[in-house]
Image (spheres, coloured by chain):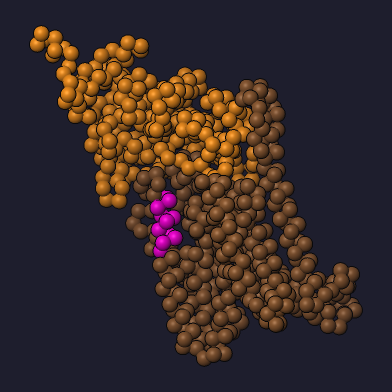
Chain colours: A orange, B brown
Amino acid sequence: MAVLSAQDLTLKYDQRCVVDGLTAEIPEGKVTMIVGANACGKSTLLRGLSRLLKPASGTVTLDGKDIHARPARELARTLGLLPQHPTAPDGIAVRDLVGRGRYPHQGFFRSWSTEDDAAVQRALEATETLELAERNVDELSGGQRQRVWIAMALAQETDVLLLDEPTTYLDLAHQVEVLDLVTDLNRKRGTTVAIVLHDLNLAARYADHVIAMKGGEIVALGDPITVVTEKLVRDVFGLESRVIPDPVSGTPLIIPIGRHHTAATELELVS
Amino acid sequence: MTTLESPAEMALDSNRTRKHWRELPSRVLTRTAVLALGVVVMFAIYVLLGSYTVTIPDFFKILIGLLTGGERIPGASFIVMENKLPRAVIGVMIGAAFGLSGGLFQTMLRNPLASPDVIGISYGASAAAVTAIVIFGATGPAVSAAALGGALGIAALIYAISRGPSLGSGGGNRGNAAGNRLILAGVGIAAALHAVVNFMMTRADIRTAADALVWLNGSLNSANWDRAGMLSLALLVLVPAVIALAGPLRILELGDDAAAGLGIRVGFTRLAVVVTAVALAAVATAAAGPVSFVAFLAGPIARRFTRKASLPASALVGALIVLTADYVAANLAPLLLDGTVLPVGVITGALGAPFLLWLLVTANRKDA
């Protein structure tokens, strides 16, 4: 069990304030999606939650304890992070890369153990990258590579996992694949997951809990069915849209309108 | 290396796959062992052969004679104990120190250009040493002390400049940007220090200038046991530091954010790596002058040979380069140049540059 929350959190880059006095909680055992327009502070919030950015004021706590007051390595056994642009060292094999996720579990004098082997094996199986295990990461496709990075984060075996735009640069099929994988992880292991995601439709479909942000503040949060509305899309993205039930999942499906089209309901009104 | 079986087949036999993986690091191990053997062989050639040849039984007789205070071989005892052996020992130590220093910089900054000779640290040592020689008439240990001080001082300055206001905070790629700033600041400062060195050389009288020039080229001529002792004391502190940093450095390779997510204190680790790498380059430079290209080349050659970035391999390659180059400088160059013995840095520079170009050309063909 692990509850990650932010109290009155203010985050700044140099002097520029990006998140100002924000209070939020990542609900335990659920998949939370953080959505919002570009530069709304959602990635910054994730950085703040994951200890990458020291708060200018306020605190981030994990199970009630300030994350900045805990030893980095101990924290990394509970709180995992997959950043937007990790770098694979030249010529590294998939299994070796995934194995580096075990770093926080190794002591100064305790080297590789059978438990580490088993964790890597489980991560490779869960992400269906076992057949890639001996390949070089450089040789993989974008989708395969992203699965390998997720495998590394899984090998860390944390109770909370934060992912910063894990579907960027992936085609639709691979996006769905990655989100399915994260959902599996949540359902099977009870991992608390928080994801910053651009695609509002996929966020609405895969989220148990949505946090919508604008200008560094939370505009709405809760169940996607109640949160994701035409009004929210207008408020957060400045976009007119229709929101209909997703024919597959019943979750909100956003249909953007744009300048060159008219919404069907209005057409019906005209005719 | 990758076997061409069907994925399903490999997945089925996961035990064997795991075994295969276990064999992977052992290739690095065997290659590293080959390098270590190479250093031992080169060390033996260096001490036993050359302008004065000693047989292996004689060598042990000399060694035992010295340790037990027994019989000495006239001439040979002196040449081996006071010249060849300390020179070889110092050669191995500075080579290893330069190799480790370059390897640390290159791994941390993810940039093959990052090495103490490129980013200006060696120039800091040179400027301070030449100033000491020309202005203060310093010799021996005083020059080494000046070089050490110069290297550390300039490194601190470069680090301060490259740090700027926002290192360690900010977006995912700023870590790399900080690395590039470090390299650029170093290149800029190196140019300024180069001017200082040239200015000093034009002010010096011809004999002092000749002394300074030998030092600037990097030379093992002044090798003696005192110097070897001081160098080994420094390495006794620095090598364990490298070993302690090797694990976190492997994680830092994944990028600053990913490393922080895995529980690395990025800012602290980065600073510790810089301090260790600078100190290694500084003590090696203090002992023998800026032997060019060793720190720069050891890492890429080691990586080419073991197919993996490896700090022990970098150290061994560094030692091998210095021993071989000094052997060539002291024994083969005189045959071609009517008896002129060259400083070791001339050989590493002359062989290093074409080798670097060869690495570039073949790397482009294969990897890019």
Residue B180 shown in magenta: yes
Residue at point 50% right, 19% down? A188
Q: Is residue B348 above or below residue B269?
A: below
Q: Nearer the viewer, residue A64 or B156?
A: B156
Residue name at image x 64 percent, y 62 percent:
B318
Image-based side of A249 in relation to B183, left or right: left
Q: Position of residue B188 (x, y in %)?
A: 40, 67
Q: Is residue B93 above or below residue B79?
A: above
**Can you give x and y, in whole percent of width and height, for residue B139 in the image?**
59, 84
Measuring from the top left, give residue B244's x and y in whole percent: 59, 52
Q: Quadrant of residue A92?
A: top right
Is residue A57 part of the magenta span, yes or no?
A: no
Q: Nearer the viewer, residue B220 or B248?
A: B220
| Quarter of the rendering containing residue B232 | bottom right
Q: Give me the residue at 48% from left, 57% from top.
A: B271
Residue at 27 percent of width and 36 percent of height: A38
**B362 with respect to A209 (left or right):** right
The percent coordinates of residue A190 (x first, y second) are: 47, 22
Residues in magenta?
B175-185
Q: Which quadrant of the figure contains the N terminus of chain B?
A: top right
In the rendered structure, the answer to whether residue A245 lies left or right of residue A108 reads left
Q: Is residue A7 visible?
A: no
Examine the image and state in which quarter residue B141 appears: bottom right
Residue A174 in view, yes or no: yes
- Dominant secondary structure of the residues highlighted in magenta in the image: helix
